[in-house]
Amino acid sequence: MNRLFISVEGIDGAGKSTHIAAMVEALRGSGHTVCQTREPGGTPLAEALREMVLHTPMDALTESLLIFAARRDHISQVIQPALARGAVVVCDRFTDATFAYQGGGHGFDLEVLSRLEQWVQVQPGSALLQPALTLWFDLPAQVAAQRLSGARIPDKFEAQPQAFFENVIAGYARRARLEPQRFVRIHADQPPDGVRAEVLAALRTRGLVTV
Ligand code: TYD
């Protein structure tokens, strides 16, 4: 069932949004029903928590608890029902973002995050709910900063210095090393056509698209 759960990750400015739209189109073109969603968010409660997390100063534990609370609601209200009816779930960020941003960026205790992950993502009688495929849009923090500069009013995370994003990248790299079969690293530092080709190749390899 979880074969159909895809997450998309990367630092701010990596270009996820454009390519998520193309992915969803390709999946639909291959006959799938797609549930496109995001974290933090995806339900009214989780979207309210997102507003707080993105705009209110708080410590890293509070932030992690709110994000996992949002995730809990999102999983039970949206992700699990969609997977149960056979839809492909395309989620803009999931738990790897918590390990990368709160763990890597803010240096928060990875053990505590692992315990929260176990609590929130446990499914009755079976394994941890995780995406089957995680597309990690990887590019240097400096390139992302150039892309974001002047684009819009930054939220709490986008306003962080480059060193923060270097630590976020290290956080993603750590997760990718732990689960190489789940992660596909997309070289996001290239023109959009090249990125799109890598994304579609990853979906094709997993038998998710035919285009
Ligand atoms: P993002 O997904 O980049 O959305 P948008 O493109 O609309 O700005 O923004 C979400 C922000 O939340 C991003 O800066 C990363 C942060 N975040 C965390 O810090 N931890 C998490 O677990 C998640 C899911 C997101």
Image: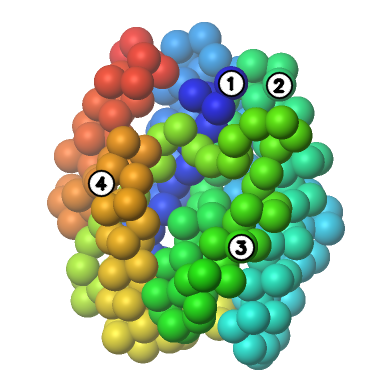
Q: Is mark 1 on a helix, strand or loop?
A: loop
Q: Does the image show residue 21?
A: no
Q: What separation in Å lies between label 4 and label 1 (alpha carbons)? A: 23 Å
Q: What separation in Å lies between label 3 and label 1 (alpha carbons)? A: 24 Å
Q: Which residue lies furthest to the right in this view?
A: 45
Q: What separation in Å lies between label 2 and label 3 (alpha carbons)? A: 25 Å
Q: Mark 4 points at which residue?
A: 185
Reading the chain from its start, which is encountered first: label 4 or label 1?
A: 1
Mark number, residue 84 = 2
Q: Nearer the viewer, residue 135 or 12?
A: 135
Q: Does the image show residue 2?
A: yes
Q: Name the residue under label 1.
A: 1
Q: Position of residue 30 (x, y in %)?
A: 45, 11
Residue at position x 48%, y 43% from top?
A: 7
Mark number, residue 199 = none
- In the picture, measured across the screen, residue 62 lies left or right of residue 210, that is right
Residue type, label 3: Arg
Reading the chain from its start, which is encountered first: label 4 or label 2?
A: 2
Label 4 crowd bin: few (<14), some (14–19), many (20+), radius 10 Å: many
Q: Nearer the viewer, mark 3 or mark 1?
A: 3
Q: Where is residue 181 in the image (x, y as percent from the top left)?
A: 31, 36
Q: Is mark 2 on a helix, strand or loop?
A: helix
Q: What separation in Å lies between label 3 and label 4 (alpha carbons)? A: 26 Å
Residue at position x 59%, y 83% from top?
A: 60
Residue at position x 52%, y 9% from top?
A: 31
Asked if marks 1 and 2 touch (Cβ < 8 Å), the reply is: yes
Residue type, label 1: Met
Reading the chain from its start, which is encountered first: label 3 or label 4?
A: 3
Q: Which of 9 and 113 is in front in this view?
A: 113
Q: Mark 3 points at which residue?
A: 115
